[in-house]
Amino acid sequence: MSNDRLIIFDTTLRDGEQSPGASMTRDEKVRIAKVLERMRVDVIEAGFPIASPDDFEGVSAVARAVTDSVVCGLARALERDIDRAGEAIKPAKAGRIHTFIATSPIHMAHKLRMEPDQVVEQAVKAVHHARRYTDDVEFSAEDAGRSEVDFLCRIIEAAIEAGARTINIPDTVGYNLPGQFGTLIEALLNRIPNADKAVFSVHCHNDLGLAVANSLSAVQAGARQVECTINGLGERAGNAALEEIVMTVRTRRDMFACDTGIDTTQIVPASRLVSTITGFPVQPNKAIVGANAFAHESGIHQDGVLKSRETYEIMRAEDVGWSANRIVLGKHSGRNALRTRLKELGIEFASEEELNDAFTRFKVLADKKHEIFDEDLQALVSETVASETGQHVLVSMRVCSETGEVPLAKVTLSVYGEERSAEAAGSGPVDATFRAIESIVDSKAQLQLYSVNNITSGTDAQGEVTVRMERSGRIVNGQGADTDIVIASAKAYLNALDKLASVVQRAHPQLGDV
Ligand code: KIV
Ligand code: ZN
């Protein structure tokens, strides 16, 4: 790869999925991976295969589905992890193994309980072992941001010598500052004798809100791969946001000696899909993908933009995939129009039954709403896919809410195929609905967060409700959409219950053992 190309390594499906509540099913991973492929992401890190059979299957399914991006599996510097990752990426046209070990004094002493010499030895063994599966091996020095430079030089030189073609420098705990991180990358590139045999990569966390700034500083210092996630999803405060990295490099070409191969028009669809699947809403003022990112509210700004776009706009909304609330379909649109528009949005159904189900839902929505936007279609598809696996399905509900009266809800659910009903009172219609559901299912879960957003503008818009629920330390996010926000709330609650029922025990790559 030439030196003026910045490789985009997306880890939404791995580090992004490590966010509490963001876990995805195999099929959801494949849907996101297909959008990333269409976006021309160079490398897709699809998961940590040894974590659980589901994680293995997820990576393997992405490896089968994707042909134009490299598919990567994560492995600690352990033979059993690497064997699992090697197996999982086998179906890929181009597969990578990403192996890592911690290199900071604090991690070596307290997490690994190993001497630095042992860490180097294990890293070298791991890279050699990974090379038995693929030539494309990446080595990460976990917590490099708090490691000693001399030790980093030593272990990285050894990893390259052992056959690593990409060297990743993570700021695992988001501790670095941009100038400092750039200087670190420059020092490594200058001091490691075989540095020219590998691509240097960075992987920054956002604990101090500096993940993107640190990554970009590293790129200016010579890094040529950035690890990032859609919407900045990721462990704790998240990872560097792909959309911000890509658009900064593209918009400020004068400041970078490289560019990405990304098709930026796929950014907004990818952002929406990730948000819908994970239940992590995008804040309105989020750069590039937030609803307000291109909205000019103040009269002065609007006047400026109307006279000359460049006065206040440094990017064009359409270049990142905003379609300006286009009405795409209506009540009279047929099945083919639906299929065609969904295809344009990158959504294809696995079976004709799924399309039929989506079409039925579309007709119901179009009767209520008349004008259907892309955003409505995306929510509708998520619901169609969710209903495939639904153990808790809303059959009907009735809510009474009147001034001066206690709100009441009557809910009928199908729970694992059995129809059950209950009534409850609550402090408001949503509270009454959740209480009625609980008196049927008795989930023993705690509601941690409840939020409503409108999917498009106008009072006839669908409301999208997100609920976050916790049970025995496991956290899930449920989402539901409807023109009636109380019904949307019930759907979101039931979606979360389905997810709680299907959460499996899995290992975390950076904590605990497998
Ligand atoms: O943050 C980190 O250090 C990681 C590694 C596994 C690359 O995610
Ligand atoms: Zn990370």
Image: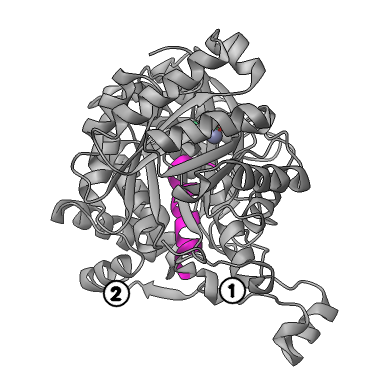
- Find residue 333 and name its label: 2
Residue mark closest to the camera, 1 vs 2: 1
For disc 1, does the CB lie below 8 Å from ligand 2?
A: no
* 13 in relation to 426, above or below: below
Residue type at the position of mark 1: Ala
263 sits left or right of 324 in the view: left
Q: Which residues are magenta?
A: 265-280
* 136 in relation to 471, above or below: below
Q: Which residue is mark 1?
A: 317
At mark 2, the secondary structure is: loop
The answer to whether residue 143 of the structure is visible from this angle is: no
- Find residue 335 and name its label: none
Across and down, in percent, residue 413 comes to: 34, 30
Across and down, in percent, residue 344 comes to: 33, 70
Across and down, in percent, residue 479 comes to: 47, 41
**Residue name at image x 56 percent, y 16 percent:** 116
Q: Residues within 10 Å of mark 1 (few under 14, many from 20)?
A: some
The answer to whether marks 1 and 2 mark residues whose Cβ atoms lie closer than 8 Å is no
Residue type at the position of mark 2: Ser
